[in-house]
Image: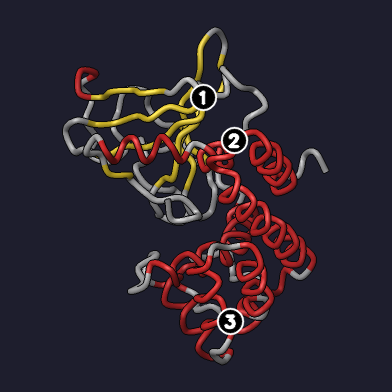
Amino acid sequence: MANNPWQRRIARADELAARYATAAELLRLYAAIARFQADFYHELATQPQKLAPNSNPFATPLGREVASAFRRFLPVVEQHAPAKLREAARALAARDDDSHLQLLSAFWQANETLASETDAFFVRAYLQPYVAALRERANLRYSGPTAFVCPFCQRKPGLGVLRPLGEGSQRSLICSFCLAEWEFRRILCPACGEEDPAKLAVYTAEELRHVRVEACDSCKCYIKTVDLTKSGLGEPVVDEIASVALDLWAQTQGYSKLQVNLLRL
């Protein structure tokens, strides 16, 4: 189980929820979602007929079998989320299966564009195990030019990660949707391509020194990066959520996040 990425994220979320009171509610919600995601991913792994064809899966309409577990996902949010999301979960549960499939398909085919940010939260969280399963089956090995969007699903990166490499570290980006990871240059803004180090600021906080805000003073966007050379036990997706205080600080400084995380933060 230790090598299962979903289980590692769940364990890390439980650990950090007990450590950081300011992010505990968010982390408990994430852990509940990740438990559903782990089960759904396992279900897909044992029923591969539910997955879209390998060739251009994003051009393939979602089938009813993909949407079949959405009704099971909604009570997870209703049980663990704040009041606004609980109400939204109940409203979605009152809609029929055709409406659910239309909502999921709109997100899938429109590259995350939905009229409602709340609907986008439910759909992205639900479909993440599905798109992750597609990516893993595709066995992506990207070695092209620096990619500013995910080489697999073309979504924006949600966070960065620094992994140990020799005497230093290697920067990568992690997709906000399918969780693909690809190498990215250290001195380069993933939003606008700025390369001037004087315009690429890095900020950290004492409480979570291994999480950093990487901000660009050209486009005023930022992304958070988890530095695993400083905390080898970190799980990037989870530690990024735990550092919500850094988001609040960055936004008060006039920066906008390149891509919100799974919890729409």
User: For residue 199, which quarter of the picture?
Assistant: top left
| Residue 101: % across, % down | 53, 83
In three-dimensional space, the C-alpha distance between marks 2 and 1, rounded to whole angstroms, equals: 9 Å
The residue carrying pointer 3 sits among few (fewer than 14), some (14 to 19) or many (20 or more) residues within 10 Å by Cα, namely some
Q: Comparing marks 2 and 3, which lies closer to the viewer?
A: 2
Q: Nearer the viewer, residue 163 or 238?
A: 238
Q: Determine whether 206 is above or below 238 in the image.
A: above
Q: Are marks 2 and 1 in contact (CB under 8 Å)?
A: yes
In three-dimensional space, the C-alpha distance between marks 2 and 3, rounded to whole angstroms, equals: 40 Å
Q: Are marks 2 and 3 in contact (CB under 8 Å)?
A: no
| Residue 141: % across, % down | 54, 41
Q: Is residue 169 left or right of residue 197?
A: right
Q: Dot 1 corresponds to which residue? A: 207
Give the residue displayed 50% in from the left and 79% down from the top: 61
Q: Dot 2 corresponds to which residue? A: 20
User: For residue 12, which quarter of the picture?
Assistant: top right
Task: Tell me the amino acid under the disc marked 1.
Answer: Glu
Task: Tell me the amino acid under the disc marked 3.
Answer: Gly
| Secondary structure beneath label 3 | loop
The residue carrying pointer 1 sits among few (fewer than 14), some (14 to 19) or many (20 or more) residues within 10 Å by Cα, namely few
Mark 2 and mark 3 lie on one chain; the one further toward the N terminus is 2
